[in-house]
Image (tube, rainbow, N blue to C red):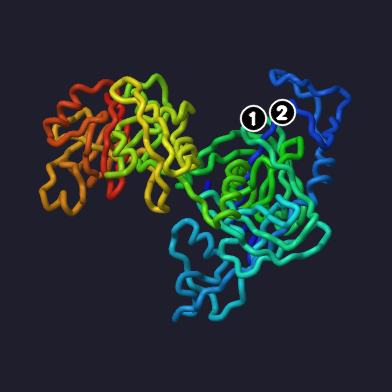
Amino acid sequence: MSLHWTARRAALLFVTSAALCACSGSSNAQPSTPAVPRTAAPASSSPEAGAVTGLPDFSGLVEKYGPAVVNVDVAERTQQAGPGGGSDSDSDDPFNDFFRRFGIPGPNFGPRNAPPQHGTGSGFIVSADGYILTNAHVVSNAEQVTVRLTDRREFQAKVIGVDTRTDVAVIKIAGHGLPVVKIGDTNKLRPGQWVVAIGSPFGFDNSATAGIVSATARSLPGSDNNYVPFIQTDVAVNPGNSGGPLFNVRGEVVGINSQIFSQTGGYMGLSFAIPIDVAVNVENQLIKTGRVVRGRIGVTIQDVNAQLAESFGLDRPRGALVSSVEPGGPSDKAGVKPGDVILAVDGQNIDRYSELSTQISNMKPGSMAQLAVWRGGKEQQINVTIAELNEKAERTAARSGGGHGADQAARLGLEVRPLSPDEKQQAQTQGSLVVERASGPAAAAGVEPGDIVLGVNGKRVHSVTELQDAARGAGKSIALLIQRQDAQLFVPLRLP
C-alpha cells in the first residue's frame, strides 16, 4: 500500500493528493454541543468500562462548527513549456503530481501554454478576522486561492506561509466576525475515542464522516517525515478532505486531515492526521515570521528493534539509536557517540526514534537539552546545546539495512577486504573494510556488497582480525555499524 495526498484535482476522480486526520479529547467527557445517545441507556463515564451502551449523535457538532469549515479551490501555477511540448520541471499530465511526490521522473505530455490546473481541498477558520489552516500540499503551488464558505460566500485568499515538513499552511481572507472552530488538546487523545472529519471530498462541501482513533503517534512507513507524530483513525477521508479539521466529541479540533493509505487513491480504512498542537505551533511562527524555526542536535538516528535492544543490553526496544554524529555539530561537541541510545530528553522518555525528532525540533535554538543516553550497559546524562535546523542538515535512517563482517567470520555470513587509501578517500569514509559478499545472517539483515564496515556493538573495527574477534565474542545477536553511500546506520544480525 502507499501513502496518498488527498487534495482533489479537477482533472481526476482519484488523485495522489493526501489527507491526515487527528483527534483528541477524553472519551468520558460530555460534548459542549450535545451528543445524544441513540439508546435510552446512558453511556458509562468510567474509562475502564468495557461495554458500549450507545452511539453518539454528531448533528449538534456539525451544525455548530460546520460553518467554520471551508472549501479551498486552487488554480496552480503553470510552468514554461519545454521543447518537447511539456514543461521543463512540471507536466500538465494529471499524474505528474504523483510522480513528483514520490521522486519518479514523470512524462511530459502536457500541451504548450496549457491552462492552469485546478485543485480542491479543505480548511478551517481559526480566527474571526480570517486566518485559515489547511495543508501545505493544497496551496504550495497556488497561483490563486479561492475560499468558499457554507453560506456560499467566496473570498480570494492570500497564502501567509507554507511548511512542507509538517504539511501545514496558513492562508488569510479579508473578513470579520467569521465563524471559528474551537482548538482542542491533543495530549488528551486516546485510542478508541470517537472523532469526526468535515471537509469537501470530491467537491461535496461540508461532508461529515466519523470513526475512532487507532493510534496517537504513528510514524508512516516509507516516509522521511519525522517531525509529525501522525494520528491514525478509521475516519473515511478522501480526495478533497485535505486540510479539513478532525473534531473530538466535544467539538474541538484535534487534527488536520492529511494522508491516507490507499491502493486506489480513495479511502481504504486508514487515514492519518497532523496533531493540532503541531499545526498551531507552525501557524504561530508562520504568521509572526513567515517561516518555521526548528532545533537540531546533529545526529542521524534509527529505531531500536528487539535484536538491537539485545545487542546493546537494553531491557526492551526503546529509544533512538545514534548511527552517526555530525563532525563539529552540537552532539559531537557534547560527547554523543555512534552507538549511543537516547532514552529521554529533559526527563521525557523516548519510546520510538521519531519522538526524538519531534521533541528536539520543537526546542528553541540556543537552549540546553539534557539527554539520557544508554552507553556501555548503563545510563548517563549528556547536555547538548540546541542548534537551528538547516533543511538538509540531518537525515534519519528509518530502517535497518546494511552490514559489516569479516573474511573468515562465518557466523556473520560476510566476506570483506581492506580498503585501499584511494578507495577510502573516494568513499570519504573512516572505515577500513568493504563487504564483497554477504550470506546467512548478514544477507538476511540486508547487508550488500559495497557496504563499508565501521563497527560492532558500538566499537570501531579497523581490520579483519578485529571483526573476527567481535564475531567470536558475540552472543545471540550483534549490532553492526555500516556506511552505505553517505549514510551510516546500525543493522542487527541474529547469529546462529
Q: In this view, does 161 lie to the left or right of 235?
A: left
**Mark-to-mark CA distance, 1 and 2:** 8 Å
- Looking at the rendered image, the quarter that the C terminus falls into is top left
Viewer can see residue 305: no
Q: Residue furthest right?
A: 40
Q: Is residue 444 left or right of residue 88?
A: left
Kind of residue indicated by mark 2: Ser
Q: Where is residue 258 in the image (x, y as percent from the top left)?
A: 61, 49
Total residue callouts: 2
Asked if disc 1 and disc 2 are in contact, CB closer than 8 Å, the reply is yes
Q: In this view, does 365 lie above or below 18?
A: above
Front in this rendered view, residue 357 or 411? 357
Kind of residue indicated by mark 1: Arg
Q: Where is residue 453 in the image (x, y as percent from the top left)?
A: 21, 39
Q: Where is residue 494 in the image (x, y as percent from the top left)?
A: 31, 27
Residue at (71% x, 50% y) in the render: 126
Q: Is residue 102 left or right of residue 484?
A: right
Residue at (48% x, 35% y) in the render: 355
Residue at (69% x, 54% y) in the render: 123
Front in this rendered view, residue 275 or 259? 275
In the rendered image, which residue does mark 2 sit on? 27
Name the secondary structure under disc 2.
loop
Examine the image and state in which quarter residue 163 appears.
Answer: bottom right
Examine the image and state in which quarter residue 411 appears.
Answer: top left
In the rendered image, which residue does mark 1 sit on? 190
Disc 2: CA contacts within 10 A as few (<14), some (14-19) or many (>=20): many
Front in this rendered view, residue 166 or 398? 166
Viewer can see residue 30: yes
